[in-house]
Amino acid sequence: MKVKKERQQRSGSMESPANERYLYVGTYSSPNTAPGGIRPSQAEGIYVYKMSLETGNLSRVQAIEADNPSYLAMAPSKRYVYCVNELGEDEEGAPLGRVSAYKIDERSGQLSLINTRSTQGTWPCHCAVHPSGDHLFAANYGTGTFTVFPLGDDGAIGPMSDQFQASGNGSGPDTVRQEGPHAHMMLPNPGAQHVFGVDLGGDAILAWELESATGKLVPGAISQAKVPSGSGCRHLVFHPDDHRAYVINELSSTIDVFDVDPWRGAFLWLQSISTLPQDTTFTRSAFHPGHPGQVTTGTNTAAALRIHPNGRWIYATNRGMDSIAMFEVDPESGKLTSAGWVQTQGRIPRGMDVEPLGTFLYVGNQNSDTIVVFRIKPDDGQLEGPVHVIDSPVPVDFAFGPFAA
C-alpha cells in the first residue's frame, strides 16, 4: 500500500468539523535527548492535532512549550489534559520532576497552562486521572515513588496529598535496570475500587485503596502481585470487563496475563507470552549504566501496551524489532494468542494508543520523528497500512480529547 505522508507544516483540514476530534501528543523536548535517543530533540513540548475520524489523518493545530511532557492523561470531562515533566535533578541533587495541568479551549482545542506541581521525585514517566476526575496519579521512575494530587473543579493540581516509596529489589536481578525501585505506572482499575502501581525495579504490581476525602493511599488487602524475576514490568492495562489484567515486561519482552478480583485487588497469574516471534534472533538488551534506555543492535525491549475498546485484541510495541505485536484475547479465559507483527516504519516505537472508537491505532517512532497511523480491521483486529505517516518530533504518548466543534 502506498504511504500517504503528511508534512508537519500542513495547517488546514479538509474534513467536516463534525468528523474530527483533537489529539494531544507528548514528547521529549529540546534540548533534551530522549532515553535511547540518538540526537537532541527538536520538539517544543505538547503538540495538538485535529484527527479525522474518517481517515485517521492529522493536521497540526498548536505546539505549546513544555519541559519533557513525555506522558499525558486526559480528564474524564475532556476539558483538561495533564502531563508529567520528565526531569531529573539539579546540580545540588534536588528533584526537578513535575506534573502540569492544561485547559482545553472548547472551540479550538488549543491548550493553556493552568499550573504545575513538583512530584518531589525524579524522572516522572507516567500519569493518570481517577475516573471521578478528583485526583491525579504520577509515577517517579528515578526515585521509585508513587504520588497523588487532588484536582480542583477548575482543573488545577493541588498540593500533593500522598507519596508511596517502593522498596524495589535493592539490588535486583538486572543490576543496571533493577538496582532499585523504578515506578513506571500508576492507575486505577476501571471500577476504581483500587489503584495499582507498576514497579519495574521490583518486578511487582502494588495495590492500594484511595481515600477519596484525603487523597491518601491505603495498602490493599492483597498488597502486591509479582511478575517473573528480572522481567521488569512496565505498563498495565485492564480488560473492559475489569476481571483481566495484562502487564507488559520491558526487559524480558513478554506480557503476563492475570485474573483480577476488582473488589480485593487480587491478581491471579494465568499466562506469559512473548512479544517477539518464536524464531526471533533478537535478544535481551545489555544496558549501559549511563544510558538505561538504549536499545543496542540485535536486542529488544517492550514498551507500550494497549487493549482495543471491545476487549478482543491487544497491541504491544517492540523497540529493536521496531514492530507492533498483535494478540487475540480469548473471550472465556482472557488468555492471549499471537496474531502477528507489523513494522512501525521507524525506529524505537515508545508510545502507542488506540483511538477511542477503535478504528485507528497511532504509534510514535521516537527516533524517526514520525507518527504512524494504522487502520484496525473490525473483523479480526489486524492492522492495515500504515495509512498515514506524519512528521512530528520525538512523539512519545497520545491523549484523545474532545470532538472538534
Image (tube, rainbow, N blue to C red):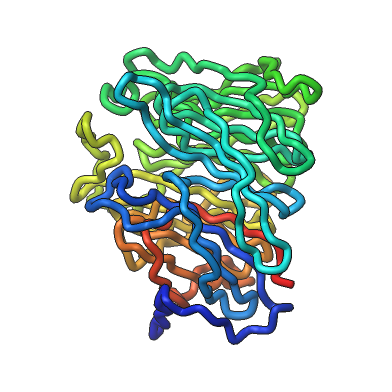
Whether residue 243 is visible, yes or no, is no
Residue 323 placement (x, y as % from top left): 37, 59
Q: Position of residue 248 (x, y in %)?
A: 47, 41
Residue at the spot x=39%, y=24% of the render?
Answer: 229
Residue 54, how many percent across, how many down? 63, 79
Nearer to the camera, 282 or 20: 20
Q: Is residue 228 above or below residue 315?
A: above
Left or right: residue 167 compared with residue 300: right
Q: Quadrant of residue 269?
A: top right
Residue at x 34% of width, y 68% of height: 345
Closest to the observer: 91 or 255?
Answer: 91
Near-viewer residue (78 or 323): 78
> Disc count in the image?
0
Residue 300 point in image, percent of width and height: 29, 46
The image quadrant that residue 285 belongs to is: top left
Q: Is residue 45 left or right of residue 127?
A: left
Tell me the quarter of the image containing the C terminus. Answer: bottom right
